[in-house]
Amino acid sequence: MPSHKSLRVSKGMDKDSPDIHHDLNSLKTKFQEMRKVISTMPGIHLSPEQQQQQLHSLREQVRTKNELLQKYKSLCMFEIPKE
């Protein structure tokens, strides 16, 4: 059941106004565009639990790679150009 506030707003609007139809069509188009964008996001097909597992795995990979990078830097095998 609509609230009293929405009834007052809808009674005050001209539902046949071309501006209202234009705005509604514009909003509908934006929703369709956003649905397309969301459907192409990586990992959207995974459950929240699977997304959390993947995030944890990726964070572990970053941590490991950072540790390896620090080890390589400490070996002084690379010539670091001075600017």
Image: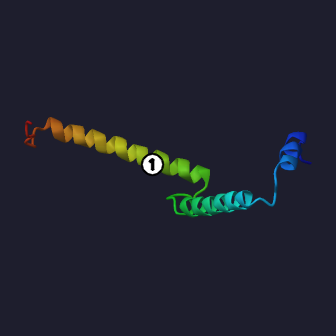
Q: Report the number of discs.
A: 1
Q: Residues within 10 Å of mark 1 (few under 14, many from 20)?
A: few
User: Along the line of sight, which residue is nearer the eye, 16 or 26?
Assistant: 16
Residue 45 visible in rendering: no
Quarter of the image holding residue 25? bottom right
Give the structural element (helix, strand or loop) at label 1.
helix
Q: Is 31 left or right of 60, judged from the image as shown?
A: right
Q: Name the residue located 21 percent from the left edge and 38 percent from the top edge.
A: 71
Q: Residue 45, how many percent across, how many down? A: 58, 61
**49 shown above or below 75:** below
Q: Residue 37, how many percent across, how many down? A: 54, 60
Q: Mark 1 — residue?
A: 57
Q: Residue 18, how many percent across, how many down? A: 73, 61
**34 shown above or below 71:** below
For the C terminus, the image quarter is top left
Q: Is 14 left or right of 18, judged from the image as shown?
A: right
Quarter of the image holding residue 79? top left
Q: Name the residue located 40 percent from the left edge and 44 percent from the top edge.
A: 60
Q: Name the residue located 36 percent from the left edge and 44 percent from the top edge.
A: 62
**Residue type highlighted by circle 1:** Ser
Quarter of the image holding residue 14? bottom right
Residue 49 visible in rendering: yes
Q: Name the residue located 8 percent from the left edge and 36 percent from the top edge.
A: 82
